[in-house]
Image (spheres, rainbow, N blue to C red):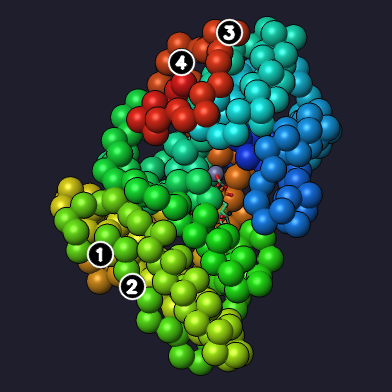
Amino acid sequence: MSAAELPLILGIETSCDETGVGLVRGCELLSDEVASSVDQHARFGGVVPEVASRAHLEAMTPTVHRALDKAGLTLADVDAIAVTAGPGLAGALLVGVSAAKAYAMALGKPLYGVNHLVGHVAVDQLEHGPLPKPTIALLVSGGHTSLLLVRDLATDVTPLGDTVDDAAGEAYDKVARLLGLPYPGGPPIDRAAREANRAIRFPRGKWGDGTYDFSFSGLKTAVARWVEDGVRDGRDLPVADIAAGFQESVVDVLTRKAVDACLEHGVEHLVISGGVAANSRLRALAEERCADAGVTLRVPRPRLCTDNGAMIAALGAEVVAADLPPSSLNLATDTSLPVDRPLAA
Ligand code: KG4
Ligand code: ZN
């Protein structure tokens, strides 16, 4: 089948604070529009669910139309609708799923409720082509830190390890707050770390414990103690050195466990995705360690790492290609949809 004959998938993402709409055929990205409510949450230091839901409601229709216009397509061209069914914020998910049902019903096209986490992995296909089978995926976002063995994006995703407390992105956001840096904390910590003179050495959570689980709350506490001690002693806070030390601890553990998982499972390909995959130091260290271990690394461009609709359309395209049955129009949202269910129901 040529690319033009593949079904056109409209992907809708509303699990957190980004209203994302993407249009995809197979591995071809046609359009990717995102309306973010991040500015409305910044002063609270985290996402306020009710504010996010209201913003999704207002952004949904305009974002769908913008995505179609940019691709020079209309709703009549859409062959199937994929939507994030979970995991995510209850009210936010509900807005996207309700909109997707309305489009599916009005257009008489099938609806697929898909998994946000697997979408983060699937999006890499839009940049680097079909994912080799199997691939190890390191998923690092604001809500999740997971290592996955992906034999098939639509049907066979096995979790190898997860965070036991804070997710990697959550740790970035909390540490940024401790350092007086803005929300979301990943980008400012990434930037500050580049100005460091001497990175401060912080502990590595669950280091060498023989599992693929992660823990970042001890690290966060260690940073908090460092900051408190400095304030008590009247010292200037070496923000860049703390940021660099914190970041090194996070990316050191992430990359080491990811490469270990590849070696143990005899898998030659690693994909890193999710918001934290936009981190420059994570990308550089992963590149280095993968090269040393003979593992081929794939990381989507930063824009595709953070939440977007194209990732949901990309997974939708896989699910359609695998001939899985569409979701019913009674599709329910699932705030804690497990990662081993790429298609919700
Ligand atoms: O995947 P994502 O957009 O949303 C979730 O599904 O959670 O990830 C958001 C997270 C935030 O915690 C943000 O601080 C982090 O990704 N992030 C980064 C960077 N850019 C975004 N973390 C580290 N370095 C970055 N450059
Ligand atoms: Zn996400």
Rendered view: 134 above or below 62: below
Q: Position of residue 280 (x, y in %)?
A: 51, 70
Q: Position of residue 162 (x, y in %)?
A: 34, 46
Element marked by disc 1: loop
When asked about the image quadrant of residue 48, the answer is top right
Q: Nearer the viewer, mark 1 or mark 3?
A: 1
Which numbered disc, 3 or 2, marks the residue that appears first in the sequence?
A: 2
Q: CA distance from mark 1 to mark 4?
A: 37 Å
Q: Is residue 162 left or right of residue 10?
A: left
Q: Is residue 20 left or right of residue 199?
A: right
Which residue lies at the image location 30% right of the left edge and 39% below the top edge?
Answer: 159
Instruction: Using the image as rendered, state which of residue 66 and residue 330 is in the foreground.
Output: 330
Looking at the picture, which amino acid does disc 4 mark? Ala
Q: CA distance from mark 3 to mark 4?
A: 10 Å
- Label 4 sits on residue: 345
Q: Nearer the viewer, mark 2 or mark 4?
A: 2
